[in-house]
Amino acid sequence: MKMLRFAAVGVAAALTLTACSQGDEGSDDATDNGTPAPATIKLWLNGTDTGDALREYLVTTFEKENPGSKLVIEEQDWSGLVPRLQTALASEEQTPDVVEIGNTQSATFTYAGAFSDISDLYEEVGGAKLLDGFVEAGKVDGKNYALPYYSGARAVFYNKDMFAAAGVEVPTTIQEFGEAAKKLQSDAVSGFWFPGQDWYNGATWLYTAGGDFAVQDGDQWKGALSDPKSVEGLEQVADLFANATNAPADADSNEPWVPFNAGQAAMFSAPTWARWSIDLPQCNKGVDPDDTSDEAKALRGEQQACNEEHTGIFAMPGNTKGEFATAFAGGSNIAVAAKSKNQELAKNLVRIIYSPEFQEMLGQNGLIPGNTEYTSSMGDDVYAQAAVSAAINAKLTPAAEKWADVEGDRILEDFFQQIATGTPVEQAAADADKLLEDTLN
């Protein structure tokens, strides 16, 4: 029996789940014909990545295919998600039935026994066509406990008018990117919106320089932020913090399009679905969000076309022209909670998520579908091209059993904030390496 301890944020107590719970899964009451009895099941989705149209499809299709049953979707904030999961997944009364889990968090919760074995669904929902790295993050002893939902490697959005006014061209190397960001920087405008706690984007410079957060040495994990290659990338991060952004040092990566829309940033980096959140003042038609008339739809179309006329996008370039940076591979997995009392209904929802219709909807909304067979649904416009290019070299965080503890303790947010507030890189890296090793081991 493998037992892991979860560190809770700001709380002395810790939740313990055991791997044996993976064999102690809830069970549905069955009707006379063997189908699951009607019930209301709960799906946790994180942030706004899964848009309203996708949510409506899941609810409508689930309730149509499971007469008498209801699907309730609850949105969770990515910030503070780990401790909320620790609490909910340990309780039959509080647990969601199906849960979206960040790919960096999958390994910890999987090893801890928080999810049901859904290996029987693996081939049915895509098998070898599923995003491989995400499959591995949700696998233990050859069994599947979490499967890929979507990937969303980050690309750079930029204000074309600001680029033109400053005489800046789209950069072709990551070094040119830094130079462009500094040239665009002013007291009123951030060349690049880069909050001090934004480790998701900070990882791009770390990885592209050949560094890493931690590496495995035998059965132990060793912090790798002090490695010379890591330090090289992190020094570039420090330069951007000091000379290319006005973003707060104590803020995270949440909603970077807000300052962009307000004219306070020339560039920001986010998954390509962020295109739908861009709302430049000169393009806004003042349409009521609840107005579903044909006139309102036409105005929204004009508004989006205007936004895209003034906004460009590119995949972060690498060290050499023609190459792409190694960005953090953002994205999520889907799992069935081990303590759910509605196992079969939960699996029915998982089947709908992997249906061709829903997978194509993910692609049409700028997300790389969990089943790579449907990546063509993303289209071939500049946004799809940027998403695919950004994903070419994208890299996951270390596949450590306790990586979710690193995120739960906000070690990386604190580390990058230290750099943003002027702590020398080598000093901050040495301190963070010690924390990483204490946590992972």
Image (spheres, rainbow, N blue to C red):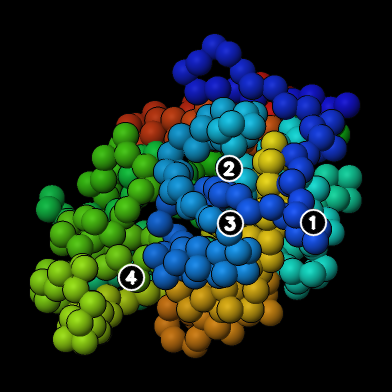
Question: Mark 3: which amino acid?
Answer: Ser
State the CA–CA distance, disc 3 to disc 2: 15 Å
User: In the picture shown, does residue 435 fall above or below 24?
Assistant: above
Nearer the N terminus, badge 4 or badge 1?
1
Q: Which mark is residue 32?
A: 1
- Asked whether the residues under the numbered discs 1 and 3 touch, taking CB atoms below 8 Å apart as contact, a structural biologist would say no
- Residue 160 position within the rendered picture, expressed as x and y whole percent measured from the top left: 24, 76
Quarter of the image with the C terminus is top right
Pair 1/3: label in front? 1
Question: Mark 2: which amino acid?
Answer: Pro
Residue 292 visible to the viewer: yes
Which residue corresponds to mark 4?
A: 276
Secondary element type, mark 1? loop
The residue at the point 62 percent across, 69 percent down is: 65
State the CA–CA distance, disc 2 to disc 4: 28 Å
State the CA–CA distance, disc 1 to disc 3: 16 Å
Label 1 environment density (alpha carbons within 10 Å; few <14, some 14–19, many ≥20): few
Nearer the N terminus, badge 1 or badge 3?
1
Question: Mark 1: which amino acid?
Answer: Asp
Which residue corresponds to mark 3?
A: 69
Which residue corresponds to mark 2?
A: 96
Q: Which mark is residue 113?
A: none
Nearer the N terminus, badge 2 or badge 4?
2
State the CA–CA distance, disc 3 to disc 4: 32 Å
150 relative to 142 in the view: left or right: left
Label 3 environment density (alpha carbons within 10 Å; few <14, some 14–19, many ≥20): some
